[in-house]
Image (cartoon, rainbow, N blue to C red):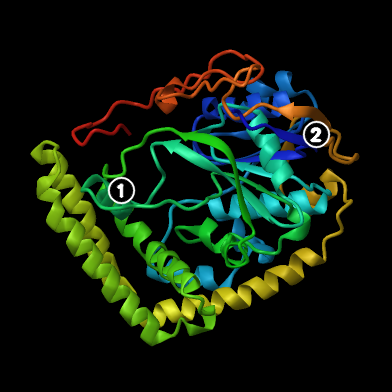
């Protein structure tokens, strides 16, 4: 018997941090068009704001904001400078700017009165657009955030991918790749470290205030393409995995002292060793086994770059940063005009949106009963046993969703780039 969800809700904004070519924004544009909400694109790398406007403004007319986030943006913006980030940069420099983009989205949304902000990564697809509404309706008194269940190729760290591939039990956690929040009731931030979304959601997890609603499909990538990826992830992976383990034990963050981190790092090293032993049994060509082994070795070598004292110092700095960030954003009024907010942030917007007016929020959608995710109008399931790449139908019978093929690279371990 299909279960349906009654809802009266709206989505105000979809925020996409991107550095990939503009074509990767097609899914976000489709959702914003269907939901009648604002699409905020924070661009860098191979994506430029002018390109975003040229390709998508005709579909979203007046509801598209595109800004370029320049390299080193945080160096000139005190609001986005954090003590913990300086520690992480000294231990494990990061090449991604996704954290600052997500923090920018939080500030823009909070200052302009947005109450339903949907974070969406450019490599995820939400097959059923109504799932975004379900996530929006989940955020309320009980839940401060709502994530989606990611199907298909899971977005774990390199070490965790190796664990799963070699037969280990590997769970996943709600992330910011497809996440609904209310910026007016959220005072956390995204630190510039791998697993930044775990840190953002730590309080919610402690309070059991994270909901789960809907399905998103992850495009495939090759986690073992270069050992450097595992090296860059290790510090954040150790921090986040260990803090959530501490949380599950019912202990406070203040218990994460040097002795705790000494034990945590030792446990992590043994875990990587155990995964490495199983690599020889993986049913892939020898070249694939060598790449997995190289990634694991890179992760172990990365542990030489930080100490238990570094981990303890990072957590203490992060706690102080949270208090400072709360003070900064609590000073923002929630009815500022978009132009003044972007001016304050020293960002140049592209598009035809009226900067002197408030944001055009999402239209209120009232469905007496919304069909089950990926069900047709009769409640029959559409997902079945199809792979995520086959997902195409929605409750509105829109055109099939086709995941763009990634560039072909070495696929000796069974995944593409």
Label 1, secondary structure: give it.
Answer: helix
Task: Tell me the crowding category of disc 1: few under 14, some 14 to 19, or many 20 or more residues within 10 angstroms, Cα based.
Answer: some
Label 2: few (<14), some (14–19) or many (≥20) C-alpha neighbours in 10 Å: many
- Kindly tell me whether residue 352 is visible in this rendering: no
At x 20%, y 57%, the residue is 275
- Quadrant for the N terminus, please: top right
Residue identifier under label 1: 161
Residue at left 60%, top 59%? 74
> What count of labels does the image hold?
2
Q: Secondary structure at mark 2?
A: loop
Is residue 221 found left or right of 398 in the rendered image? left
Residue at the far front in the pictured view: 1
Depicted 416 relative to depicted 292: above or below = above
- Tell me if residue 296 comes above or below residue 179 in the rendering: below
Which residue position is annotated with label 2? Answer: 362
In depth, the one of 1 and 108 nearer the eye is: 1
Residue 387 at x, y percent in the picture: 39, 25
| Residue situated in front as seen by the camera: 387 or 59 | 387
Which residue is depicted at the point 11% across and 36% down? Answer: 285
Residue 51 placement (x, y as % from top left): 61, 27
Front-lying residue, 92 or 241: 241
Q: Residue at x 53, y 23 (%)?
A: 381
On-image quarter of the C terminus: top left
Residue 405's tag is none
Q: Position of residue 258 (x, y in %)?
A: 40, 85
Residue 283 is left or right of residue 52, and the answer is left
Q: CA gap, disc 1 to disc 2?
A: 37 Å
Res 233 quadrant in image: bottom left
Residue 54 at what x, y percent from top left? Answer: 66, 22
């Amino acid at each position: 018997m299909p279960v349906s969800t009654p809802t009266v809700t709206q989505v105000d904004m979809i925020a996409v941090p991107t550095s990939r070519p503009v074509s990767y924004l097609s899914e976000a544009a489709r959702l914003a068009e269907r939901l009648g909400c604002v699409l905020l694109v924070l661009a860098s790398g191979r994506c430029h704001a002018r390109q975003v406007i040229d390709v998508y403004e005709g579909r979203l007319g007046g509801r598209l904001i595109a800004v370029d986030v320049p390299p080193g943006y945080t160096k000139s913006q005190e609001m986005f400078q954090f003590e913990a980030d300086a520690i992480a940069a000294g231990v494990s420099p990061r090449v991604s700017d996704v954290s600052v983009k997500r923090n920018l989205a939080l500030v823009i949304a909070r200052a302009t009165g947005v109450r339903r902000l949907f974070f969406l990564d450019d490599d995820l697809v939400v097959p059923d657009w109504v799932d975004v509404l379900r996530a929006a309706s989940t955020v309320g008194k009980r839940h401060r955030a709502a994530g989606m269940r990611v199907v298909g190729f899971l977005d774990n760290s390199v070490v965790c991918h190796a664990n799963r591939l070699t037969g280990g039990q590997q769970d996943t956690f709600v992330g910011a790749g497809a996440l609904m929040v209310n910026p007016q009731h959220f005072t956390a931030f995204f630190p510039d470290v791998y697993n930044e979304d775990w840190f953002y959601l730590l309080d919610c997890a402690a309070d059991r205030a994270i909901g789960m609603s809907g399905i998103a499909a992850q495009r495939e990538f090759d986690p073992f393409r270069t050992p450097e990826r595992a090296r860059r992830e290790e510090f954040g992976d150790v921090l986040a995995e260990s803090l959530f383990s501490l949380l599950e034990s019912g202990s406070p963050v203040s218990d994460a002292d040097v002795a705790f981190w000494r034990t945590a790092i030792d446990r992590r090293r043994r875990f990587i060793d155990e995964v490495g032993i199983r690599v020889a049994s993986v049913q892939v060509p020898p070249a694939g086994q060598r790449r997995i082994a190289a990634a694991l070795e890179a992760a172990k070598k990365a542990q030489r770059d930080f100490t238990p004292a570094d981990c303890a110092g990072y957590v203490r700095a992060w706690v102080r940063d949270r208090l400072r960030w709360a003070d900064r954003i609590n000073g923002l009024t929630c009815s500022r005009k978009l132009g003044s907010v972007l001016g304050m942030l020293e960002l140049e917007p592209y598009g035809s949106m009226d900067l002197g007016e408030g944001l055009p929020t999402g239209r209120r959608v009232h469905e007496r009963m919304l069909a089950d995710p990926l069900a047709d109008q009769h409640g029959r399931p559409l997902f079945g046993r199809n792979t995520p790449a086959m997902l195409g139908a929605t409750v509105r019978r829109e055109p099939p969703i086709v995941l763009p093929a990634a560039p072909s690279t070495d696929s000796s371990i069974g995944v593409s780039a």
